[in-house]
Image (cartoon, rainbow, N blue to C red):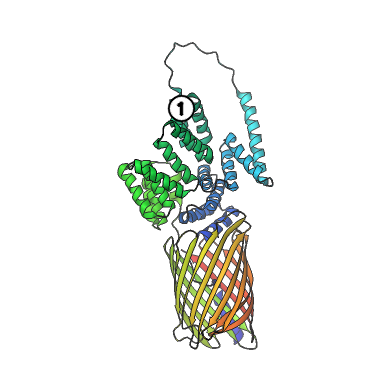
Amino acid sequence: MRRGRRAALAACMVLAIAAPQGAALAQTVDELYASGVKARQAQHFDEAADLFRRALALKPDNADALVQLGFAELGRDHLPAARDAFSRALSLAPTYRDASFGMAEVEFRSGNLDAALPLAEKVAQADPGNADAAALVGNITRAQRARSGREAKQAPAAPVPEKKPPHPRPDPVAGLMEQGRRLRAAGKLPEAEKAYRRALRLAPKNTDILVALGLVVGSSQRFDEAGHFFDRALAIKPGLLDARLGKVRLAIWQGDTPRARALVDGVLASSPDNVEAIDLDGRIALLEADYTRAGQSFQRVLALDPRNAEALVGIGDVRRAQGDDDAAQEAYRQALAIEPGSADIEQRLAVPQPRKWRLDLGSEVSELTNGLGDWTDSSASLAYRLTPRTTISGRTRVATRFGHTDVQVEGRIDRAFSPAFSAYALAAATPDADFLARYSIGAGASWQVVAPARAFGPLSLNIDARYDNFANTNVTSISPWVQGYILDGRLGLSARWVHAQDDIGTRADGYVLRADLAVAPRFNVFGGYADAPEISDGTLVPTRTVFGGISWDVSDPLTLRASIAHEQRPTFDRSIFGLGLTARF
């Protein structure tokens, strides 16, 4: 009979994986980022670009996601989109080598060899062991030599000039300025810079040329040089509005939001109705996550200039950040109608709507030694993302032990107060409890102290606390823990301290160590060891556990998991087998 019951339970578990402890959450930035990296490494570039854009919709200033998006767009051969992603990453982290390498690759593929070479050489010099950078330098150098040879062969003989009657010559400065403007609009920054520099040699005191050069050079991530051009313009014309606005943009590109805010507030104090200054105010408010102010600024721009596409894009960005993707799409479509063919707007429109629901199903069977029979523990969780920062979830748990069955229900709310800090609270109840807590309350928080980087990070400090009320006792537990990632985010390590105490003063302490490894783009393994107390029917039971498992991302919305653990207790041993799934929709 026991074997038949085990077979039936095992058959039921094929449909689910043991869900991790805690209520299910909607996809976070880190989850989207990790899935995107796996997809890109598997050369699923369309899927990777989708995942990174969704991560950026939640955290627009994530330089790592921007770099990964750039490489995904390179994989799709979307050079303008890749250029935009790498440029935005460099504006946030000017020394980010991968972003510089990606920009060099974009320039090389675009045929801008003179711009590509210094970028690639800078990466190769900073990291002599980077074989990809060294190879790119070689490819660019060979392409330059080949181009020089072709141009020498194809150069036609100089024609004999035909004598024409003298006529008034057009202003060369105006022609070069127009040429630079067109090249900059087309994304050809090196060529635009050359045109502006030629104009500057003809008119070294022309502040319009100095501001234009500052904007082009700043867009190329040469921030110190860009600031020098703006300062030269201000030295010639103190208070020049275009130069002051250029310095605001420069602060935004450098990721210095407080400085950008101070500068734009100064401009608005003297020019309160300047459309560009108001638009920049909205952009800065968006970076500050002040969505009310951002929306008001963009609406004010539209009141002054109803066909301002940048303001419409800003409104779309605000609505997307607030979780209203339908309204965001409508704003982007209106902007595209004003600027048909805009790659930047089309990229925003291409981002699919985020999945707001998450379902977790899991089931475990435990075999006990000493003829004590089996335990089962199954759960179903459903989470809904109310806003990009708030998720609510409900969970039902059904557990059997020694012929008794308990049904527990739980509610939970998670809130991200900033990109680096989040917290949660939960409450659970078990009607007619036999061995589970009659009711429980809990809370926790997570603080990212180190942002993601290529070699190390993110690093988070976390804490969980819980109070359980049993029929005969109450137990309070607290568990601070730290989690970090290395190897480009492929290996995660965590260490948890566990402290528990009941209402008569009995105390127990222990620890849990765990490692998570991405062995393939869609395949992960985990394992660990615990020497920590378990709360069993209100009793603090010392346990030692070895555990491990796998997870397989069948697709972006579906993940399957399996786990196994062996637990040693003072009176018996316990072997645990679990299966489960996570579905996002």
**Any part of residue 302 in sight:** yes
Local secondary structure at mark 1: loop
Q: Which residue is situated farthest in the right direction here?
A: 129
Dot 1: few (<14), some (14–19), or many (≥20) neighbours within 10 Å?
some
Q: Which residue is situated farthest in the left direction here?
A: 303
| Residue in front for this viewpoint, 261 or 415 | 261
Which residue in the structure is indicated by mark 1? 205
Quick check: 378 above or below 214? below
**Any part of residue 336 in sight:** no
Residue 306 lies in quadrant? top left
Residue 241 lies in quadrant? top left
| Side (left or right) of 307 relative to 522 | left
Please state the horizontal and vertical placement of residue 11, each as a whole percent of the image. Answer: 57, 77
Quick check: 535 above or below 290? below
Q: Residue at x 65, y 27 (%)?
A: 149
Please state the horizontal and vertical placement of residue 215, each as a whole percent of the image. Answer: 47, 37
Residue 269 lies in quadrant? top left
| Residue in front for this viewpoint, 473 or 561 | 473
Quick check: 344 above or below 434? above
Please state the horizontal and vertical placement of residue 118, each as a whole percent of the image. Answer: 61, 37
Q: Residue at x 31, y 42 (%)?
A: 304
Give the amino acid type for the residue marked by disc 1 in the picture.
Answer: Lys
Please state the horizontal and vertical placement of residue 81, each as a whole percent of the image. Answer: 50, 45
**Quadrant showing the N terminus:** bottom right
